[in-house]
Image (cartoon, helix red, strand yellow):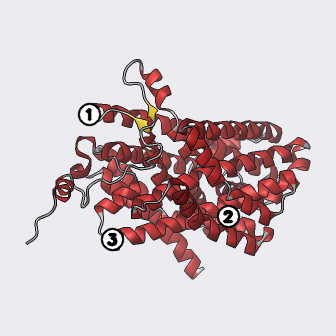
Amino acid sequence: MLQRSGTEAHAAENGWRRARGRASLIEVFGSIATRPSGPLWKKLLAFLGPGYLVAVGYMDPGNWATSLAGGSKFGYALLTIALLSNLMAILLQALCARLGIASGRDLAQACRDAFPRFVSWPLWVLTEIAICATDLAEVIGTAIGLNLLFGVPLELGVIITALDVFLILWMQNLGFRWVEAFIVTLMGIIALSFAIQIALADPQWGGVIRGFAPTTDIVTNPDMLYLAIGIIGATVMPHNLYLHSGIVQTRRFGDTVADKREAIKLATIDSTIALMFALIINASILILAAATFNKTGQTNVAELDQVHSLIAPLLGSAMAPTLFAIALLCCGMNSTVTATLAGQIVMEGFIDIRLPAWARRLTTRAIAIVPAAGVTIWYGEAGTAKLLILSQVVLGLALPFSIVPLVMFTADRHKLGELVAPRWVTALAALVAAIIILLNFKLLYDAAFG
């Protein structure tokens, strides 16, 4: 019998089938220094950043479509789903940070190193499908934003969105902090735009508070369930799990267990703060739709350009449509940037391609954006809302194939050693996975049998 090589034996001893390969996002790996000493808040300030890139995926244009449709049709009732999905996101993103820091692998690399190819390659294909669905939403949102603000035709706007790959290459050459600063600036513009619109809408705050309470109608009403799973799919997105486990490794922290444990704590705080900010944005979208469209009996509003045309008379301000379009464009730009990074992490992690940085970036971007652009141009403006909502449901159905490996890896002491997730965290994460899988089966049953 042939003996295993030293690296394979070492990998097996540490719970992995294969030894750790090239670092995630090698161009910026460990490029940002953290603060090894001092008070917690100073350490946190040095670590902040990855959570906000992750939070972008929780407020993308696909989320707008599902939240606008849910708010216009069911009022404030689906706010409870926005809250539930955000709590799920906080838990899962904390596990992503733990995996990246403790194992030195992003989720794609972990799947490659833990599973045989007949398992890891189908997982890669499913993840690429999910990223295509993500890009579909972001391409549509950005194109519509360009159309509403500058009159750019939808087909041309779709092509313009592909140029984000060059924007990322340029910003990464300046330093990964520039990417983070770009994202945070656009998030600030989105927040300001919605703050003004919510003030103009003057929602019923009692109804808003009641909307965060759960109701059985979400499970018994197929239409509400469809949108609820869409919101979950738009919030807990598969590509975000891969993204976070990769970009958290842009921080330079020590190699000891104590150093990594502190890095996990800081990364968890970072993502939790950022995701609470994302919840405010998501809730604002739904509240805006409920306070304007549902209140006036317009219960079938979902098209983003339709919202743009209707919102001015309902809010009594000519400024409202412009604010809506600006926020939408910023959201689309932010989301395409982070989706591009996630696409690189997924392809490099699963199949370990070795190409120059620009070629890898173009290849990974093309795989995701070409199908999305083709579908968008084929359907045109008339079908954008249906495509956006469908894309989010696809993401919801794809989620278990990312969540289950994540929970498995972070619960495995052979793989993470002393940094393995506490049992109560693993139990909650397993419960989240079970809830999502059950909701997906319910959706498929309703779709099949009416």
Q: Is residue 77 left or right of residue 176?
A: right
Mark 2 and mark 1: Cα distance apart in space: 45 Å
Three-letter code, disc 2: Leu
Residue 238's spot in the image, x, y percent? 49, 58
**Height in image: 150 above or below 319?**
below
Residue 256 is tagged as: 1
Labels 3 and 1 touching (C-beta < 8 A): no
Q: Quadrant of the C terminus?
A: bottom right
Quadrant in the picture for residue 201: top right
**Height in image: 185 above or below 448?**
above
Mark 3 and mark 1: Cα distance apart in space: 32 Å
- Disc 2 crowd, CA 10 A, few/some/many (<14, 14-19, 20+): many
Labels 2 and 1 touching (C-beta < 8 A): no
Q: Is residue 325 left or right of residue 318?
A: left
Mark 2 and mark 3: Cα distance apart in space: 32 Å
Q: Earlier in the sequence, mark 2 or mark 3?
A: 3
- Disc 3 crowd, CA 10 A, few/some/many (<14, 14-19, 20+): some
Residue marked by disc 2: 388
**Height in image: 40 above or below 312?**
above
Three-letter code, disc 1: Thr
